[in-house]
Image: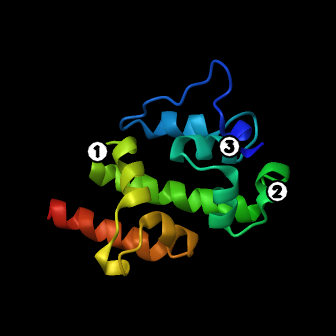
Amino acid sequence: MIAAELAVPAGEAVPVFNRNFDVFMAFLNADTSPSISPKRFGLVFRLDMQTLAAQAHVHRNTVRLAPDSEAIQSHLRDAVRVLRAATDICGSIEKAIYWFKNHPLPTFDYKTPQTLVSEKRTEALIRYIQSLQAGYTG
């Protein structure tokens, strides 16, 4: 069932976003809901719903039954904030997603940004990214 939930619906492909964060955000909003779609977030980040639930520290059924819950939405918003900051440095959303999921950061005991967001260390991570950006510009 989880694999079926992760499948891209017929006629819906994950677009290439490049630097267009508005298109990325529009894709994450599946319908008229004011929330980020956990399903679409999972598609973009290649996460099954059980893994997403574990990262958000909620029961696995919560993602499916209560996708607008504050615990899930807070986690998704934090991940999107970090991704936005990383996109400014990486040059594209796709590169930022790769960095977010895979890049071990020495400053944070070699944890990935994805792990840090799950640990609710988003503010420290954003400050780190801003310091990197300041190093590039001045």
**Which residue does the image show at 44% across and 54% down from the upper left?**
83
User: Which quadrant of the structure image shows residue 55?
Assistant: bottom right
Inspect this view and state whether residue 23 appears: yes
Which quadrant is home to the N terminus?
top right
Q: Which mark is residue 91?
A: 1
Residue type (three-letter) at the residue carrying disc 3: Lys
- Tally the marks: 3
Depth order, front residue of 18/115: 115
- Numbered tag placed on residue 53 in the rendering: none
Toward which corner of the image does residue 18 lie, by quadrant?
Answer: top left
How far across and how far down the image is residue 64, in percent? 80, 49
Amino acid type at circle 1 is Gly
- Which residue lies most toward the top here? 11
Mark 3 / mark 2, whichever is N-terminal: 3
Q: Which residue lies at the image location 32% right of the left edge and 51% below the top edge? A: 88
* Label 1 environment density (alpha carbons within 10 Å; few <14, some 14–19, many ≥20): few
Colouring method of the image? rainbow
Q: Residue furthest right?
A: 65
Tag on residue 39? 3
Q: Residue at point 43% right, 30% down?
A: 16
Label 2, label 1: how far apart the Cα atoms are: 35 Å
Element marked by disc 1: loop
Point out the tag, 1 or 3, that comes first from the N-terminus: 3
Which label sits on residue 61?
2
Where residue 32 sits in the image (x, y, percent)?
A: 75, 34
**Quarter occupied by the C terminus:** bottom left
Contact check, label 3 and label 2, Cβ < 8 Å? no
> How far apart, in angstroms, are the residues tagged by discs 1 and 3?
25 Å
